[in-house]
Amino acid sequence: MKKYRNPLRRSILIGCGAFIVLLCVTLSALGFVTYYLGMIEKYQTYIGDALELALTEIDGDDLKTCIETGEKSAAFQHAQDYLDRLKESNDFTFVCIVKPLNLNESDNMMDVMAGVTQAEREENEEFYSVTLGGLTGENYSPDVAGYYLDRMSGGDYVSYYRNRTTFGYMYTGLVPVLDSSGEAVAILAADLNMDEIIQTLFRYILILLIEIIILAALFLSALYRWIDRRVIHPMTKLEQAANGFVESSHGQEDPEALTLRNPDIHTGDELESLSDALITMSHDMKRFMKNLLKISAEKERIGAELNVATQIQADMLPRIFPAFPERSEFDLYATMSPAKEVGGDFYDFFLIDEDHLALVMADVSGKGVPAALFMVIAKTLLKNRAQAAGTDLHPGKILADVNNRLCEGNEAELFVTVWLGILTISTGELISASAGHEYPAVYRKGEGFALVKDRHGPPLATFEGLRYREDEIKLNHGDALFIYTDGVTEATNGDQELFGEERMVNALNVYAEKTPDEIIRGTRHDIDAFVKDAPQFDDITMLCLRFQ
């Protein structure tokens, strides 16, 4: 049996593992985004409230004057004290008021004031404090300066942006400081260091991921055990039972030697139904093999009997040629090729007396054994009636008598087309009668073969009391007669084309000067060349007589 490289257990385990990994990644990403957006919203509110409150403590007109003159007023000092307290009581990294100047690489921002805590003053007040009107050097990039300049011409709402600086990852809130005319004179900014927030976020994601992995491992273990018990193990038993049955059937001719071990599955689902179906199939296979052995034996017996029947039928037809070696007045040859093991066509020729030769060509309706049995009866009746005719040699009367005899007890409703001719050997006169048979072809020396449109009557065994008219043909020295069944003209090739009467006459004329056996063999060769590999559907029977 074929060994698969990917067992079901491994496939299920890999599939579940991949699903769990995907689930963990998805949940972690969703958790990260949800937590991050929540934190951003929280700190935006935190920064925004602080800036909105700080604006209430800043006099925009006074601040504008202080920036223009470089002198600090009482209102300026009040605002400075408030920014100091704001930074002291909150977690802002920077709280300041600046005025954006340009987009240069340096000195693009003017310091106005900045909040300083008591601890920062004690540590280094000069470093943390700013000078009114001082320039910031390279502390602000052109991009950041551009953002500040945009806010100078914007509304009085708080806006936010993220920026990585030398002090860490900052989240900054900006709001313009307006004078009484609504003109922005400076920007109030508050920076909140996000490094701790990011670290907290990653710790949260790590804890969430660990929890998901633990839960996923427990879930995967439970799921795998359930699948193994309810699916994989029963399917493995089914596979073993099926493989055992297949191995026991290889080259096995004894149905009783086929064995199927009961998988013994009781899952109450489709797998149990499949197990029952497998057991039923094995029993049906045994019965099928027993029946097949019986049918094969019967077929062999019937085949042997058909072979005997074929031989018997062939022996009933004259097959020894030359048929009358002592008679030099004529020469004849005939063949019959059945489409099945036995056929319904037959031919016959016999001497009624020293001067009269009877020629018979017939075709029974149907194929196979029924037609062959009816052929035996018809052939026997025709020969017996013709030989008992004495001097009353009339083919029409012979066919009429045989017709009445064949109609008796013909419950199978078979019939037979017959062409019967009686040749007076001394004169060449041929009297014939046709019971629905094919037109004969006659060869005249110097003219070639041509069909003779004789008068037809109904086939024999159709109904009683029929009469058959006779035709006369005069054969001269060198003339020939060709009679046949419809298997010749109705031979069909792969394109469903019939050989037909015209092709038959043309083939006869190719071999017209030959002996009867050469004429028949040549015509059969042309039929086979026309038909090629197409199957033979009808018996092919031919008889040719040369009058000498």
Image (cartoon, helix red, strand yellow):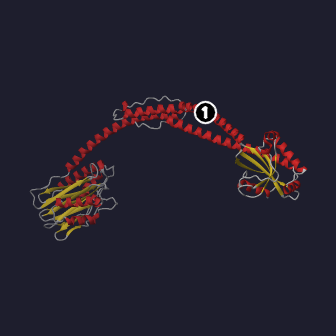
| Residue 466, percent from left and from top | 29, 59
Question: Could you tell me if residue 497 is visible in this image?
Answer: yes
Residue 260 at x, y = what percent?
42, 31
Mark 1 belongs to which amino acid? Phe
Q: Is residue 194 left or right of residue 289?
A: right
**Residue 512 vs residue 415, the one in the foreground:** 512
Q: In which quadrant is the N terminus drawn?
A: top left
- The outermost residue toward the right is 74
Q: Nearer the viewer, residue 541 or 427?
A: 541
* Residue at image location 39% in from the left, 37% down from the top: 288
Q: Where's the C terminus, which quadrant?
A: bottom left
Q: Is residue 68 left or right of residue 474?
A: right
Q: Please, is residue 224 above or below residue 363 in the view?
A: above
Relative horizontal placement of residue 422, taking residue 277 as reference (left or right): left
Query: In the structure shown, which secondary structural element does the residue marked by tag 1 occupy?
Result: helix
Find residue 391 and report its horizontal and vertical position in percent. Answer: 15, 59
Residue 267 in sight in this render: no
Looking at the image, residue 68 lies above or below residue 476: above
Viewer-closest of 139 and 16: 139
Q: Would you identify the image quadrant in which residue 529 lies?
A: bottom left
- Residue at point 63%, 34% (across, down): 210
Question: Callout 1 environment at 10 Å: few (<14), some (14 to 19), or many (20+)?
Answer: some
Residue furthest out toward the bottom = 446
- Residue at which label 1 appears: 219
Q: Quadrant of residue 267?
A: top right
- Residue 140 position within the rendered picture, expressed as x and y whole percent measured from the top left: 73, 52
